[in-house]
Image (cartoon, rainbow, N blue to C red):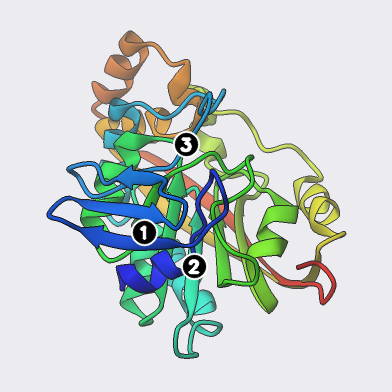
């Protein structure tokens, strides 16, 4: 429920608790009187001050991601993440935080398998428009993950990070003792067969080791799962997969048009690593 998710939030101005008010416009109001109105699409923009220095995904990039994920190509990944998350979301009042929720695709799979309340964070309002439509009972918030999170201490049972930035001290702070962090990263060789054609960067060696090192002061490593998903993609799907990721900020429209116009299917393999961590007893 949205009200349960709101109970886990804190005002980004004063850190006070929020109340969800509908009079008739939906808004978040803290005890100090700071007010954040919901956009008509259902999300809340909590960014204050200068907002964020990072470039948010455009409406076109978000559209490409929605089309690609909605086609079911990464369904196996969504199901695996949901299964792992559900194991830690069985208690009454459980809360899951999706850091970098994008269109809400992976969070939606989690919510289909558990009654947990949910918070989704992203810096792209275009992504959150779709996330709010898909996960209407979640608190979908425009927020910069590199900033202190607008979430109370020890308020979350699971943090999801699927191809998104990581803020280890903040994730540790908001997780309950024993809470789980689930991180999805690409493995070496991810989409290697089409990387050159789509402008995607190759995966650097030692990525898994750097992930564990960056989290080591806050989390204990639990387990790691590798998941390979064979894909056969049309020209338009090649264009979407090129545009939906970081390369989408730089790719030229004419390059997309060339990809989309290709009339032969391309075979490749998506290679994912799913890493589970438990927050340390002294981290929160």
Kindly identify which residue carries mark 2. Answer: 8
Q: Is residue 60 or residue 190 the one in the foreground?
A: 60
Residue 154 rendering spot, x and y as whole percentages: 64, 72
Task: Name the residue: 49% across, 33% down.
Answer: 48
Left or right: 267 in relation to 181:
left
**x and y percentages locating residue 71 in the rendered image:** 25, 51
* In the rendered image, the vertical position of residue 76 relative to residue 189, given as above or below: below
User: Could you tell me residue 143's position as x and y percent?
Assistant: 48, 42
Residue 237 in view in this figure: no
Residue furthest out toward the left: 24
Which mark is drawn over residue 47?
A: 3
Q: Which residue is mark 1?
A: 139
Give the SS element for disc 1: strand
Horizontal side of 215 relative to 269 (left or right) equals right
Going from N to C along the chain, the mark reached first, 2 or 1, is 2
Observer-nearest of 104 and 273:
104
Q: Compute the Cα span from label 2 to label 3.
A: 17 Å
- The C terminus sits in image quarter: bottom right
Quadrant of the rendered structure where residue 238 is? top left
Asked if 95 appears above or below 71 in the picture, the reply is below
């Amino acid at each position: 429920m949205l009200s349960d998710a709101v109970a886990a939030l804190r005002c980004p101005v004063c850190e006070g608790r929020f109340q969800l008010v509908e009079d008739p416009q939906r808004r978040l109001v803290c005890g100090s009187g700071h007010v954040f109105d919901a956009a008509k699409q259902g999300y809340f923009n909590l960014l204050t001050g200068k907002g964020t220095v990072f470039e948010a995904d455009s409406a076109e990039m978000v559209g490409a991601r929605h089309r690609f994920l909605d086609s079911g190509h990464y369904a196996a990944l969504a199901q695996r993440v949901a299964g792992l998350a559900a194991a830690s979301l069985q208690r009454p009042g459980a809360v899951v935080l999706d850091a970098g929720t994008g269109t809400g695709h992976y969070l939606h799979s989690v919510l289909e398998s558990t009654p947990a309340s949910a918070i989704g964070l992203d810096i792209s309002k275009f992504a959150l428009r779709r996330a709010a439509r898909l996960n209407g009972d979640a608190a979908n918030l425009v927020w910069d993950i590199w900033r202190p999170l607008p979430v109370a201490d020890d308020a979350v049972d699971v943090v999801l990070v699927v191809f998104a930035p990581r803020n280890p001290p903040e994730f540790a702070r908001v997780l309950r003792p024993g809470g789980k962090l689930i991180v999805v990263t690409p493995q070496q060789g991810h989409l290697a067969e089409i990387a050159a054609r789509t402008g995607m960067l190759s995966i650097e060696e030692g990525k898994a080791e750097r992930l564990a090192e960056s989290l080591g002061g806050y989390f204990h490593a639990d387990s790691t799962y590798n998941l390979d998903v064979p894909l056969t993609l049309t020209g338009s799907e090649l264009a979407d997969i090129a545009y939906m990721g970081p390369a989408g900020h730089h790719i030229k429209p004419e390059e997309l048009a060339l990809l989309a116009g290709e009339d032969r299917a391309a075979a490749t393999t998506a290679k994912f690593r799913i890493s589970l961590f438990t927050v340390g007893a002294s981290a929160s």
